[in-house]
Image: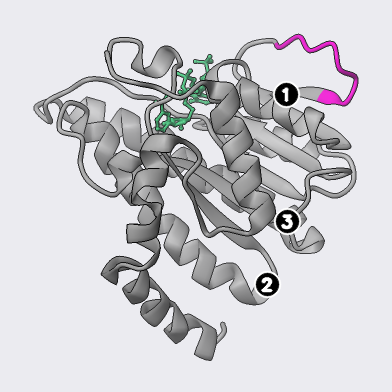
């Protein structure tokens, strides 16, 4: 899908990768970018519509859907939290699941009617930690693994309805989220370019940075991807 002239909704759009995605969508000629944020957002570009959105609030999600005027082509589920833990505190696990998993699913459900109408796309910003646990942030890893698994199911369930579902398998990116991690990181701007490049190429899994690209080929030709296709065939042979 080409972003030029398209309408895009991005959650967590006020900083980090979300903000870079807003700017990259504008650079690629998006017609309108809805920027979902928890606090007020300023953007000089008149193609940006700020929308108040905490992804854990069902009422805010419903209001956000109502603020979209006309068709919506792309939903980017970007909002996320990451807290260092050691799995000893169940509240921390619940917090991650509420935002990174259930929040993402609630937002997706709410926007689905619009995306079905436009035969649009859902882009879920996930992580290498979805594919293998990063044990310094295990609760985060669990939430991203759950969201990755959900993305695979949504892809199969929505295939007959013309809605494409993409998983972004992000490596480390230089944002507030991983300030404490002293490792090589991609810039948010280059990650955003990689995400839209992958979307424009129609990649099911998008590997937008050099760390994630290093496993792209292995993932695409591996047993887990082959199994995903095998399992998805059950849905596609017998549509609901
Ligand atoms: N940075 C990395 O290395 C990395 C790696 C892999 C995956 N990712 C993923 O990429 C996405 C963006 O991460 P980032 O690095 O840009 O993080 P970030 O700089 O910490 O920004 C997180 C964004 O999510 C928003 N957010 C958090 N909880 C929310 C909620 N309940 N409702 C709505 N918005 C909420 C934040 O809003 P506030 O400003 O209001 O808090 C902020 O806009 C996340 O899903 C993250 O898991 C990042």
Q: Residues within 10 Å of mark 1 (few under 14, many from 20)?
A: many
- Which mark is first along the chain, 3 or 2? 3
Q: Is residue 55 above or below residue 132?
A: above
Ligand 1 neighbours mark 3 (CB distance < 8 Å): no
Residue at the image position 56 percent from the left and 85 percent from the top: 239
Near-viewer residue (61 or 232): 232
Where's the C terminus, which quadrant? bottom right
Q: Nearer the viewer, mark 1 or mark 2?
A: 1
| Viewer can see residue 35 | no
Residue segment shown in magenta: 41-48
Near-viewer residue (124 or 24): 24
How far apart marks 1 and 2 lie (CA) works out to 30 Å
Judge left or right: residue 95 versus residue 111: left
Q: Secondary structure at mark 2?
A: helix
Near-viewer residue (162 or 187): 187
Which x, y percent locates residue 168? 49, 45
Q: Is residue 166 above or below residue 229?
A: above
Which residue corresponds to mark 1?
A: 23
- Which mark is first along the chain, 2 or 1? 1
């Amino acid at each position: 899908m080409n972003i030029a002239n398209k309408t895009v909704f991005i959650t967590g759009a006020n900083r980090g990768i979300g903000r870079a995605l807003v700017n990259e969508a504008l650079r690629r000629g998006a017609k309108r970018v809805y920027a979902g944020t928890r606090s007020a957002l300023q953007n000089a570009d008149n193609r940006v519509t700020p929308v108040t959105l905490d992804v854990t609030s069902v009422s805010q999600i419903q209001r956000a859907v109502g603020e979209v005027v006309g068709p919506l082509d792309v939903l980017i589920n970007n909002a996320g939290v990451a807290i260092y833990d050691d799995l000893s505190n169940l509240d921390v696990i619940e917090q991650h699941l509420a935002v990174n998993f259930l929040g993402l699913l609630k937002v997706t459900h709410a926007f689905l009617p619009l995306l079905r109408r436009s035969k649009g796309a859902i882009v879920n910003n996930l992580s290498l930690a979805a594919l293998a646990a990063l044990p310094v942030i295990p609760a985060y890893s669990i939430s991203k693994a759950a969201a990755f698994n959900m993305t695979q199911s949504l892809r199969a369930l929505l295939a007959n309805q013309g809605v494409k579902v993409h998983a972004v398998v992000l490596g480390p990116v230089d944002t507030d989220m991983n300030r404490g991690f002293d490792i090589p990181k991609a810039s948010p701007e280059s990650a955003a370019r990689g995400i839209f490049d992958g979307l424009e190429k129609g990649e099911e899994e998008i590997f937008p940075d050099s760390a994630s690209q290093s496993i792209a080929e292995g993932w695409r030709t591996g047993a887990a991807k082959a199994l995903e296709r095998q399992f998805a065939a059950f849905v596609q042979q017998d549509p609901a």
